């Protein structure tokens, strides 16, 4: 029973990411990229004002590296978009794009962690060092949004290979209909009941078309090599704690 619950919750979490790509048409990605760039500019200005020479040098080196990696992430999103719009690509091309995307996300996360841990000697005083950590906590949170949209794009492309066009459209429209953007990953307790009800309704509606929902869940379980983001781990933990509390 616990295994079944885990799989159900994991599928729901990934569906929430999938709706990002369906409902926003990459708008979220554009806003996130703009937000990150603005935050990086703010961080740069902060270092100019409150950083020591060693801090300024370290950040300029890391900043250049980040710009290169962010450009690579954008390139992979452009490739995913091309796959989706053309509807024609090979499994090898998709999997290669996914590996490159994941590597770039991992590299971005590593640089973010390094910058967030700048020592106090990189700043003129302890308050400046503390403020820096707060700024980078905000910046780091954006990478999980980018990762989620990338996963959504990957699922969408794989669906195009594994389902007929009309089936994909039915699934995507049904998911978007029942899981609105207001269902926040970090407010798991608040939306737990709504998520479970939404999945029940999706299942009932989609399975009117040759057990489409059941086939989709099997597809997710066998084809999507995802790692949980911190938000997903929080959501899963809260839900499972809630399950235990009800037993």
Image (spheres, grey):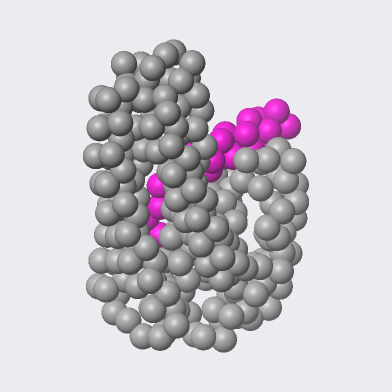
Picture coordinates of residue 134, whole percent (x, y): 51, 28
Q: Quadrant of residue 160?
A: bottom left
Vertical position of residue 244 compared to residue 143: above or below: above
What residue lies at 31% left-to-right and 16% top-to-bottom? Answer: 121
Residue 238 lies in the magenta stretch: yes
Image position of 191 with respect to 177: above or below: above
Please say whether residue 228 is visible from this viewpoint: no
Range of residues picked out in magenta: 222-247
Magenta highlight on residue 63:
no
The structure residue drawn at horizontal position 58% and vertical position 48%, both measured from the top left corner, is 9
| Closer to the camera in the image, 63 or 11 | 63
Residue at 36% from the left image edge and 85% from the top image edge: 88
Toward the viewer: 123 or 150?
123
**Residue 51 in sight here:** yes
Question: x, y (%) of residue 236?
Answer: 57, 39
Question: Does 207 appear above or below 147?
Answer: below
Residue 237, compared with residue 9, is above or below; it is above
Q: Quadrant of residue 171?
A: bottom right
User: How many dots with numbers?
Assistant: 0
Prevailing secondary structure class for the magenta stretch in the rendered image? helix
* Observer-nearest of 129 and 20: 129
Q: Position of residue 6 (x, y in %)?
A: 54, 44
């Amino acid at each position: 029973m616990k295994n079944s619950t885990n799989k159900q919750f994991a599928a729901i979490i990934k569906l929430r990411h999938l709706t990002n790509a369906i409902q926003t048409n990459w708008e979220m990605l554009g806003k996130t990229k703009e937000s990150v760039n603005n935050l990086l500019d703010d961080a740069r200005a902060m270092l100019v004002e409150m950083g020591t020479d060693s801090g300024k040098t370290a950040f300029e080196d890391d900043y250049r590296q980040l710009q290169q990696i962010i450009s690579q992430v954008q390139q992979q999103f452009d490739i995913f978009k091309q796959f989706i719009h053309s509807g024609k690509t090979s499994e090898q091309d998709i999997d290669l794009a996914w590996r490159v995307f994941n590597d770039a996300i991992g590299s971005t996360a590593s640089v973010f962690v390094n910058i967030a841990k700048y020592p106090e000697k990189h700043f003129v005083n302890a308050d400046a060092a503390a403020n820096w950590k707060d700024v980078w906590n905000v910046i780091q949170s954006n990478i999980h949004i980018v990762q989620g949209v990338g996963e959504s794009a990957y699922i969408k492309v794989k669906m195009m290979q594994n389902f007929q066009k009309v089936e994909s459209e039915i699934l995507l429209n049904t998911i978007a209909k029942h899981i609105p953007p207001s269902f926040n990953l970090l407010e798991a307790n608040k939306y737990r009941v709504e998520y479970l009800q939404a999945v029940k309704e999706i299942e009932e509606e989609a399975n009117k078309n040759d057990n489409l929902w059941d086939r989709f869940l099997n597809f997710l379980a066998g084809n999507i090599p995802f790692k949980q983001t911190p938000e997903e781990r929080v959501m899963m933990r809260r839900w499972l704690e809630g399950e235990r509390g009800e037993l």
